[in-house]
Amino acid sequence: EVTEDLTVLKVPELKQRLKKLGLTVSGTKPELIKRLQRGIVAGSMQHGGQSTKFKSGDRVMAKHPKSGGWYLAKVVRSMEGGRYLINWESDGSTAECPIEHLRRMKGEGFDVEELRVGQQLSGNVTSVRPYGIFVDVGAVRDGLVATDRGRDLFELGQQLSVIVKAIREDWSFELSLSHSLSQPTQLITEMVGAEIQGTVARVDAHGAWVDVREMKLGLIPTLRSSNALTVTVGQHVEVKVTRIRYGGGF
């Protein structure tokens, strides 16, 4: 979450901060502020608000010291001064890279460069932060849906339909909720507080998912479906709708 007031910075200071993040430094002051805010959020996304450490063998996106582009690489070892020795996947050569020019990648998934702005995808919520939620759409990195109400509206494992909103220079990317799933359906909204019958469709780390026919699967969170309530797939249960999530989940 960006708590710093960036408007008090002068244009040269904004450009210096952007340059350190490897971002474009051209544009008006409002554009520079907006770009820097996104860069800070992206950094928080990668570092989880803490100093990220990489280990040998980690797959990363690294900023090339000469071209300024971001390319796939693997960490060879850590060095002094917060720097890492990396191995470029393209040609096998090595280079030293400061930690701020490294972005962590997942081990599996398709490359972000295969995404296109406007593309519609489905995915699951993997992390909920004060500044937004991260959604796994099958890429080597999770996408960010920027919102300050993430903890109120979303939960881990929730399935969403999203649209690629922007792809950044470091191959992080921003998502927006698909319009068709941006608001709860009227049918489900009217069911809040009602007790309904359904069938347990699956049980996972997030809890028990209940099929109530014409509506989406509802979730009984793990805390409510563990010790006090043992359920199995196919079991008929009576549940109470307590609240609505974005996308019509409940």
Image (spheres, helix red, strand yellow):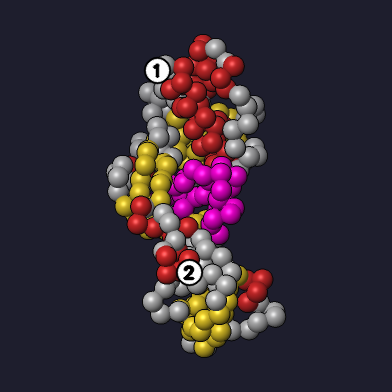
Q: Three-letter amino acid code at disc 1?
A: Gly
Q: Residue at 40% across / 35% down in the picture? A: 168
Marks 1 and 2: in contact by CB < 8 Å?
Answer: no
246 shown above or below 54: below
Per the image, label 2 sits on a secondary structure element best described as: loop
Secondary structure beneath dot 1 equals: loop
Q: Is residue 56 visible?
A: no
Which contiguous range is marked in magenta? 127-155
Q: Which residue is mark 1?
A: 27
**Screen quadrant of the N terminus:** top right
How packed is label 1: few (under 14 Cα within 10 Å), some, or many (20 or more)? few
* Of callouts 2 and 1, the N-terminal one: 1
Residue position marked by numbered label 2 in the rendering: 190
> In the image, 112: left or right of 233?
left
Magenta highlight on residue 150: yes
Q: Which kind of residue does numbered mark 2 sit on?
A: Glu
